[in-house]
């Protein structure tokens, strides 16, 4: 029987989705309803992907204040966008179909991440802490290179890059959203049969290996899943560095359990709820469209400092 807390979260997401779709009599216009439906799909896709990816990464690192962004995913995305604009003088951004841009961004981020970090894992004898340190260094390198090239761009080209620095939930392409959902569903189906193994893996390399878990192989599979989910969400709307931390902290407080059968769906639903409620608040009540990402980063940053001060890292 499903956990009552998951049922309550699912009901809250459903209610928030209905309010988001039909606020202000949107059912009278099929065009408005279609636009809101695509945006709602993007919010659900990003919330689910970021929530699950962060839970997996915290299991992998055995640390509750780390998120995949520390590995340099967001910095890699900004560098990639800057390189494209710098190399083509913005022509590629203006002429390429949106779904092709999304697919190229996703595949490039997944490929680059796996090449860099799987090579590091092999040389470091599967030391995940060293991998995180390398991720931090690469993130700084990516940001430095992106910042240098951005200074060489003219104002119109820099505006193209700047549009990708913060997550934007407006103008999500339908085909890109469909591809993102398909990739996310593949990862979710793989995880559905692995939640018990992930519970054992959270005990650490030694105990998990003693209990029969192929730790190194599962670690690689988890990195592939994390890279895919983060690449999908970032390529779809842009970087959201602290959303995962905010979502997982709320999920841990609600679930009070380390079981992945609760944590993974709980984080997915909580991510959807946070984004849908936040977007509804800013669009329908405060009339401040496209500011949700800034508020999430601000709240997530404060939460990071609070968790760090309290020492809640396990």
Image (cartoon, grey):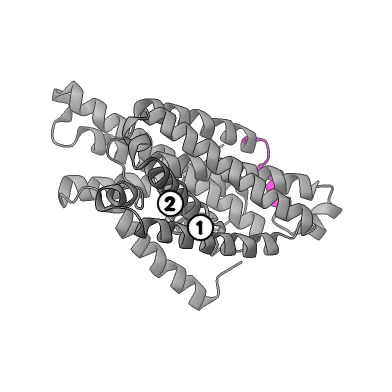
What residue is rendered at 58% in x and 64% in y? Answer: 137
Residues tagged 1 and 2 counted as in contact (Cβ below 8 A): yes
Q: Give the crowd class for mark 2: few <14, some 14-19, many >=20 residues within 10 Å.
A: many
Residue 301 in the figure: left or right of residue 219:
left
Q: Is residue 95 visible?
A: yes
Task: Report the residue marked by disc 1.
Answer: 142
Q: Give the crowd class for mark 1: few <14, some 14-19, many >=20 residues within 10 Å.
A: many
Please, what secondary structure does the residue beneath circle 1 have? helix
Please, what secondary structure does the residue beneath circle 2 have? helix
What residue is rendered at 44% in x and 56% in y? Answer: 146
How far from the left and from the top, in percent, is residue 259?
62, 51
> Of callouts 1 and 2, which one flags the residue occurring earlier in the amino acid sequence?
2
How far from the left and from the top, in percent, is residue 241?
44, 56
Of the pair 280 and 291, the residue shown nearer to us: 291
Q: What range is drawn magenta here?
A: 192-201
How far from the left and from the top, in percent, is residue 141?
53, 62
Point out the image quarter for the N terminus: top right
């Amino acid at each position: 029987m499903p956990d009552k807390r998951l049922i309550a979260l699912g009901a809250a997401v459903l209610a928030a989705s209905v309010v988001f779709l039909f606020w202000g009599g949107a059912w009278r216009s099929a065009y408005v309803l279609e636009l809101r439906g695509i945006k709602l799909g993007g919010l659900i896709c990003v919330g689910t992907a970021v929530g699950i990816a962060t839970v997996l990464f915290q299991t992998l690192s055995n640390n509750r204040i780390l998120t995949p962004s520390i590995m340099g995913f967001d910095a890699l995305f900004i560098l990639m966008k800057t390189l494209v604009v710098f190399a083509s003088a913005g022509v590629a951004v203006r002429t390429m179909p949106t779904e092709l841009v999304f697919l190229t961004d996703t595949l490039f981020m997944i490929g680059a991440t796996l090449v860099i970090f799987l090579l590091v894992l092999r040389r470091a004898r599967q030391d995940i802490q060293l991998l995180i340190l390398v991720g931090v260094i690469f993130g700084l390198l990516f940001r430095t290179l992106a910042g240098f090239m951005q200074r060489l761009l003219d104002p119109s080209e820099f505006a193209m890059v700047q549009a990708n620095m913060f997550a934007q939930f407006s103008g999500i392409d339908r085909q890109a959203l469909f591809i993102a959902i398909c990739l996310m569903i593949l990862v979710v189906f793989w995880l559905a049969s692995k939640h018990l193994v992930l519970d054992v893996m959270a005990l650490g390399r030694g105990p998990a290996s003693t209990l029969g878990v192929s730790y190194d192989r599962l670690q690689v599979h988890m990195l592939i899943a994390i890279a895919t989910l983060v690449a999908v969400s970032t390529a779809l709307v842009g970087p959201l560095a602290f959303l995962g931390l905010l979502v997982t902290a709320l999920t841990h407080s609600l679930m009070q359990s380390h079981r992945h059968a609760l944590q993974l769906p709980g984080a997915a639903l909580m991510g959807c709820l946070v984004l849908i409620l936040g977007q509804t608040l800013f669009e329908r009540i405060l009339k401040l469209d496209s500011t949700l990402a800034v508020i999430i980063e601000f709240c997530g940053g404060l939460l990071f400092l609070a968790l760090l001060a309290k020492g809640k890292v396990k």
